[in-house]
Amino acid sequence: MRSRIAWSICITLLLAGLLSADTRFSGALNDLWSNEGNWSEGLPDTNDKVQIAGGMLCILDYDAGEIKHTALEGGSTTHLRLVDGAQVSVRDWSIIGYAGAPDEPHFLEVLGGEYNANARMFIGFLGSGKLVVDHGGVVNLNAQEFAIGENTNGQGQVELRGGSLNLLSGSALPLRIRAGADSTASMDFSGGVMTQAYSDARLAYVNDHIADGTITAYGGVGTVVVETDEDNILIVKGQHPFNPVPEDGGGVVPGNITLSWAAPDPCTPGEAVAFDVYFTDDLSALELFYDPAAIRVVDKGAVTSVVVPTQPKTRYYWAIDSYVGSDADPVLGPIFSFMVDNIAPRVDAGADIVTWLQDGSRTGTLDATVTDEDAYTVLWTVVSEPSPGAAVIETGTTEDATVTLSATGQYVLQLEASDGEYTGTDTITVNVYNDSCEAAQSVPGYEPLVGDLNGDCRVDDIDMALLQENWLADNSLSEDWFPLP
């Protein structure tokens, strides 16, 4: 069996009394959450604490609505697994690994669907817990903190192999890594990403834990990439030394695509590095490796790319094994994945605008860009305006629409592009002032001209008259209120 990641080159919150769940998963009939007979008190609802223990596997494959708590615990490994179509919202805490032995972790596996934690979420509280996000899985933390290795004996692991962990909480530091003397915490990024709104403190916290080895990529052989996008969102992801294209966990459009990768340095300088490359839409064919020849697309070739056919609505998996030290014994690489699908149009509504009225209104042309491989249609709409009807979009079905604004204030306009299957949107903010001086003064960093005494953005005779009117005037204090002794 192949390892998911195996690669080298040449070498106390008080929750007492909350443990018991109102309804416990027994698995009496099968492993599906949706089967009422699998629960001690019937299907969980918004008032229920869900308890999964005793080595159970529970698979969620539909919209389960809202529950109160999630607790995965006990003396043997348990699994709660979300697959495509799954959705659940947890109103209060989620604990993955409430109790149990360190060598018996409890798993929350989000392999599809969406897990919404509407309050604090603990991975490894008093026991061993592991969160795995893969494929198209999404975990949203909507309030409070996401904590790993929370208390004494808490063993917390997070693996983002695909999908996303979105820390949407307004907490100053929504990520909390609390490994103590008797606890451990780790995060590893391969094909998945973690997002949160940017702040200097949040960036510093992530960087500190990259530096101390708590946050790694591809089991420690990759590089953790931290970047900020145009919406001021802090993004953390992993980059493997192979630099695979398509990006691990990314998406491409259907058709013949080129798989490419970077070659590692050979153990013997000057020697070419050969590769075996495997490509399939059946993950088990790679993990179990029962018929390698059937999925091999490069056979010991000294190449760094290969073209493969793809079909829409399909997830593909591929692996690169390198012969860096021995012609007979390749070094196994990780399994990369990507999704083949129609890509939503990428919409850029343009830069925000500062302008002013001329003769009671202002008419201008917007400068937007839409990128898509397919034919698409666009539509501009008014999201907000100072008063009803103040914004009139005259050519709303073209990217570079003409708009007339007839009042001062802030306008938000949205551009939506659709290719018939998916849509993309972006907004632009237009701030309108009475005149060009007000507009200039609204721009951050505005500095008035030296000599502009009346603040009208120009130096002219009026300023000179003001200066002459006060020439040699003196308004310094005439009396020393704190005379020296």
Image (cartoon, rainbow, N blue to C red):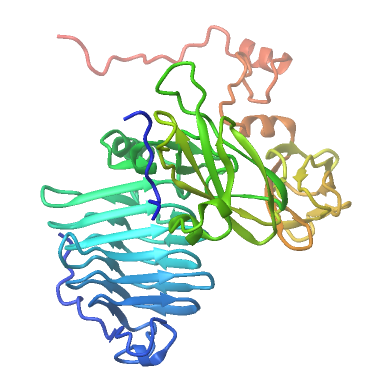
In this view of the protein, which residue sits in the foreground, 169 or 86? 86
**Residue 412 percent across, percent down from the top left:** 69, 51
Task: Classify residue 264 as left or right of residue 392.
Answer: left
Figure quadrant of residue 117: bottom left
Q: Residue at x 29, y 39 (%)?
A: 209
Left or right: residue 262 versus residue 411 is left
Q: Quadrant of the N terminus?
A: bottom left
Residue drawn where x is 29% and y is 90% of the image? 40
Quadrant of the image occupied by residue 100: bottom left
Q: Residue at x 44, y 73 (%)?
A: 88
Question: Of residues 359 and 290, which is closer to you in this image?
Answer: 290
Foreground residue among 146 and 101: 101
Vertical relation: 84 (above or below) 393? below
Could you say which quadrant of the image residue 201 lies in? top left
On the rendered image, what quadrant is the C terminus found in? top left
Inspect this view and state whether residue 30 appears.
Answer: yes
Residue at the (16%, 63%) spot, across then down: 126
444 vs 321, left or right, is: right
Residue 381's place in the image compared with 460, above or below, is below
Is residue 410 among the parts visible in the rendering? no
Furthest residue in direction front, as rendered = 328
In-front residue for pair 409/250: 250
Q: Residue lying furthest top in this view?
A: 472
Q: How many labels does the image show?
A: 0
Residue 223: x percent and y percent? Answer: 41, 35
Residue 270: x, y in percent? 49, 16
Image x and y of residue 79, in percent: 33, 70
Left or right of 350? Residue 73 is: left
